[in-house]
Amino acid sequence: MSILRKPGLLLSFLMLAVTLLAMIAPQLLAPYDPYASVGAGRLLPPSPEHLFGTDHLARDVFSRVVYGAGLSLTAAGLAVIGGVIVGSVIGLVCGYLGGAIDFVAMRFVDVLIAIPGILLALIVVATLGFGPLSIAIGVGLGTAGSFARVMRSAVLRVRSEEYVEAARTIGVRGSGVLFRHVLPNAARPVVSMAALELAVAILSVSALSFLGFGAQPPAPEWGALVSAGRDFVAIAPWLSILPGVVILAVVLSVNRVSRFIGGDR
Amino acid sequence: MTALLRVSDLRVDYGSGRRANPAIRGVDFEVAPGEIVAVVGESGSGKSTISHALVRLLPDIARIRGGKVEFDGVDLLRAPVSAMRRIRGGRIGFVPQDPSHSLNPLMRIGEQIAETLRRHRGLSRADAAARAVEILAEVGVPEPERRATQYPHELSGGLRQRVLIGIAWACEPALVIADEPTSALDATVQRHVLDRMQSLAAEHNTAVLLVTHDLAVAADRANRIIVVEKGVIVEAGIAADVLSAPTHAYTRRLVAAAPGLNATRLKPTIAVVDQHIPDSTEPLVTVSGLTKTYGATGRAKAAAAPAVAGADFSIARGSTFSLVGESGSGKSTTARMVARIIPSDSGTITFDGQDITRVGGEALRQLRRRIQVVYQNPFGSLDPRMTVEKIIAEPLRAFGIGTRREQAATVRELLGQVRLAADLRTRRPAELSGGQRQRVAIARALALRPEFVVLDEPVSALDVSVQEQVLQLLVDLQAEFGLTYLFISHDLGVIRQISDRIAVMKDGHILEQADARHIFDDAEHPYTKELIAAIPGARR
């Protein structure tokens, strides 16, 4: 299997590598300070000096997008990690113990899934206050339900495997069976779904900050950048379009790579 | 006599290009009209690939590399697809291995037979339906009119296999290819199905190519035997000659390993230095009135048929007690209750003088040091994510025995005891053969130095030659460590090789129990006699 024969996959990996670099060391990629005006002029169109042009305060938009990667993707990553942890614990406990706990907890999960993700996130943000962390918690809570379901069904499958029964007959304690046999064997579908959910979470986080619930200006959060460009969409459309294209490219790349991880080459 | 089927230099590869893996490497044989030829080999020998290549029904990755298959003057490898379609089902019948997946679950039995007749014989709908009922009667399906209107799930495995045989013979083919036709069936059912197949072949003068892993079945049924190993025919000849005077080493191994052809208990091969002598004459395990009913609760439970009804037996120290029975007899349920994997409804289990029927929690966990289990399926009972070393060390870890280094040393010692190379330590189960996996499972069971091992069909998933090696290993280990075995099997041939005492189970009841020799020499119960008569290889 050669990854070089799949240009889409290769491109996706490259895109993610660049994005990761932007998260870790934005100063290596960004040519200008994202918060200071470059002085050259306001609302300049894209050019070799300013790849994505400049905004109404004469700041370099490309540099702002690069610095925004850290904010947007950290929030999305936190959301997914939180969702995986909460969902997996619920799914693991429900699938393994069964009975009344399973029944009650899974009805709670049903309710969670029934509420649209964005609406749930809005409720959380309204309760906890604006900011990237609230968004992460809100989006994470929305994904936890589906993680719980996937984990539970995987645990139910693994629990009835013969090696799990065999582990008990060789004297492994209940907790040992759960963490050494059931969890590692049930984790794979959750991991491949987590990668897929990351793409969704990036979109949700961007959407919420577009609506103004996330990082407040002048922080260069991706959704906020698209939103800020809205006022000038008639005279400087690149202000909204180019950050939007970046969001799209990252989401598609995450999606492609997660399919690769999930075993669907 | 001119041959009906003449195969010459048949070659089949799996995969293509540089990664091509030859499965059949130049095979030549002939089948005369009306002759039964058995193709015998172990898993991976290529015997099924041969049978599928003849009718060009190979999986997509397989490529026919060359050779000729002449059937009645037509080269099947070069015949156009439309001609092949007429030949398959019409001139060549096919009996598949697994009766539970080879019938359309949404079609009535009668319609499935009629379908073949209408396609190849051009019979009208009514004629085909009438003929289908006749065919069902011919293959020995009771109440053929009623059965014809039923769906596959309403029939037992044995009846389904008869239906498939009926379909294969529906158009009076000149040749029937039967690929492991009875491997999924119980011994007594297997015997009836094979009897029926043999008489059909004789009545219609049909040639049969019988593909089987079981040399004993081949010995009973075939005129000629072809032994295949690694895609090459290593021996071919008249059945009696091949069995009585095998010339090839591989055939000799197969004959020596076939349980049905060897009628003695295996003896330990090792010189045991300090043989364990039981320190007490009391039986190690005593079971009385053990009963289990599945599923239902309350009043429904009283009405439901019990899976095990009042089993009584005791197992002497250092001996092998075997439970034999066909599927659904309750033998596995009994074993699982004795091993305290599933709870019993009533009755008591005494282990070394202690009542363990209701022991639970930590006390039950401590009991695992003394009672261990080996499962039927070596593919399912090992965690696929763990290395062999971790798997074998796990019981030691669970009980905190020894340091990490001591555990590693114990694992190495255990691998030696089950005759596995120490460098397999780092492998995962998927990288091992079935026999190696079962040895790993046995090593794991022995890690805690138990006194009592429950063996639930430990060799039925293995090839005969591997089966024999594992049985020999069990016998050696028993002598070395003074182990007591509760051995479960459906195969009396296997039971005979390992048991001291045997109990025969049917429908949840123990019909008869006695010393092994007594059971085989003069069984009292008619069902036991029937089971013994059904062991393949007995008609030789």
Image: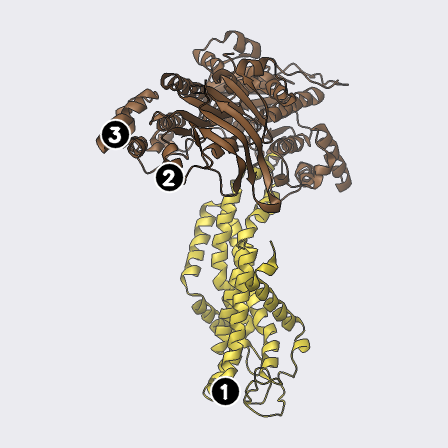
Chain colours: A yellow, B brown
Which residue is the extreme one toward the top? B522
Give the number of the mark in front: 2 or 3.
2
For the point 48% across and 63% down, the residue is A142
Tell me which corner region of the image, top left, top right, bottom left or bottom right, holds residue B45: top right
| Distance Cα–Cα, label 1 vs label 2 | 67 Å
Residue beneath label 3, please?
A: B129
B521 vs B308: above or below: above
| Labels 3 and 1 share a subunit | no
For the point 62% across and 77% down, the residue is A67
What percent of the width, then of the height, locates residue B237? 55, 18
What percent of the width, then of the height, locates residue B430? 61, 40
- Whichever of callouts 2 and 3 sits on the residue coming sooner in the sequence is 2
Badge 2 element: helix
What percent of the width, then of the height, locates residue A176? 62, 44
Badge 1 element: loop
Residue beneath label 1, please?
A: A236
Residue beneath label 2, please?
A: B82
Q: Which class describes the residues within 10 Å of circle 1: few (<14), some (14-19), or many (20+)?
A: many
Tell me which corner region of the image, top left, top right, bottom left or bottom right, holds residue A24: bottom right
Judge by depth and name the residue closer to the eye, A224 or B149. B149
A103 vs B370: above or below: below
Q: Amino acid at mark 1?
A: Ala
B106 vs A69: above or below: above
Tell me which corner region of the image, top left, top right, bottom left or bottom right, holds residue A261: bottom right
Chain identity of mark 3: B
| Distance Cα–Cα, label 2 vs label 3 | 26 Å
Q: Amino acid at mark 3?
A: Ala
Judge by depth and name the residue closer to the eye, B135 or B287. B135
Q: Which class describes the residues within 10 Å of circle 3: few (<14), some (14-19), or many (20+)?
A: many
What percent of the width, then of the height, locates residue B19? 61, 45
B346 vs A179: above or below: above
